[in-house]
Image: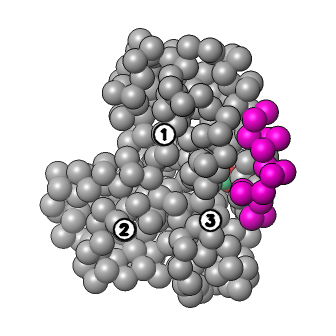
Amino acid sequence: MKPNLSQAPGPIGVFDSGYGGLTILSKIREALPQYDYIYLGDNARAPYGTRSFEIVYEFTLQAVNKLFEMGCHLVILACNTASAKALRTIQMNDLPDIDPQRRVLGVIRPTVECIGDMTHNRHVGVFATAGTIKSESYPLEIHKLFPDIHVSGEACPMWVSLVENNEANDPGADYFIKKYTDILLEKDPLIDAIILGCTHYPLLLPKIRQFVPSNIKVVSQGEYVAASLKDYLYRHPEMAAKCTEGGECTFYTTEAEEKFTESASTFLNERISVKRITLE
Ligand code: DGL
């Protein structure tokens, strides 16, 4: 059903399947502290990384519609899996019908834009969820901008669970970090830059750095997404004018509130309060 949308200015919406998008949100808030934000985590249905295209699209569209109903004119899909599997369809097929003036942006394009300057060898690696790797979104987007770059991807199915279960800094995590790092570097020993193409992975960065040789750059996407959004709002003053400036952030989850508050503190290093909602 078509949502009933207000034309009054509203917060910027930031959506993720769960907690991972909080790594993006914190960088966005650092770069653009003046705006109001709504963070929505579909924790009850996460992870998205193993789900089909159809389901990720359906869930993401529900979340986008909810954020529009809450007053957002601009929504960031702070989730690589949703950006890979749902963004394009929502932009092309759904937005013209919902409201052609509203915008949904993803995290893959801004990450890819920076990679040309990061690789000297023109060999890049991508760590991401199985869904993102299977979608081929990173090689496709990289080749649009940099056809000369050779891209190798590796799905790291255990890494999201390590973070979700607060095991990111435990010695047990080492096995799975080394495992996927070794596979990627064996696939292409010429890699000199690796994109962390999943919002959870920056929390594993200290461990990833232990197993990746120091000459290889490891790229966390938060700051590039934030810089790209800043640039977007500068280039689109008509959209900036629709984003309220109160410096507030409200949090919503589809899971139990206590659970979100507890885990979100790992990602944000601060206590927050959250409200539970349902998506349909
Ligand atoms: N946020 C997702 C991503 O960036 C990872 C978690 C999930 O699989 O839902 O791909």
The residue lying toward the viewer, choosing from 156 and 210, is: 210
Question: Residue 229: which quarter of the image?
Answer: bottom left
Marks 3 and 1 in Cβ contact (< 8 Å): no
* Colour mode of the rendering: one colour
Amino acid type shown at disc 2 = Arg
- Name which residue lies at 73% across and 79% down: 259
Q: First in sequence: mark 3 or mark 1?
A: 3
CA distance for labels 3 and 2: 16 Å
Determine the secondary structure under disc 3: loop
Question: Which corner quadrant holds the N terminus?
Answer: bottom right
The residue lying toward the viewer, choosing from 124 and 59, is: 124
- Name which residue lies at 44% across and 66% down: 26
Residue 94 appears in the rendering = no
Amino acid type shown at disc 3 = Tyr
**Mark number displayed over residue 19:** 3
CA distance for labels 2 and 1: 19 Å
| Residue count near mark 3 (Cα–Cα under 10 Å), binned few <14, some 14–19, many ≥20 | many
Which numbered disc, 3 or 1, marks the residue closer to the eye?
1
Residue tagged 1: 219
- Name which residue lies at 29% across and 66% down: 32
Residue 176 appears in the rendering = yes
Determine the secondary structure under disc 2: helix
Q: First in sequence: mark 2 or mark 1?
A: 2
| Residue count near mark 1 (Cα–Cα under 10 Å), binned few <14, some 14–19, many ≥20 | many
Question: Magenta includes 169?
Answer: yes
Q: Is residue 209 placed above or below 246 in the rendered structure?
A: above
Question: Which corner quadrant holds the C terminus?
Answer: bottom right
Question: Magenta includes 56?
Answer: no
Residue tagged 2: 29
Magenta-highlighted residues: 165-179
Where's residue 189, x and y in %?
62, 14
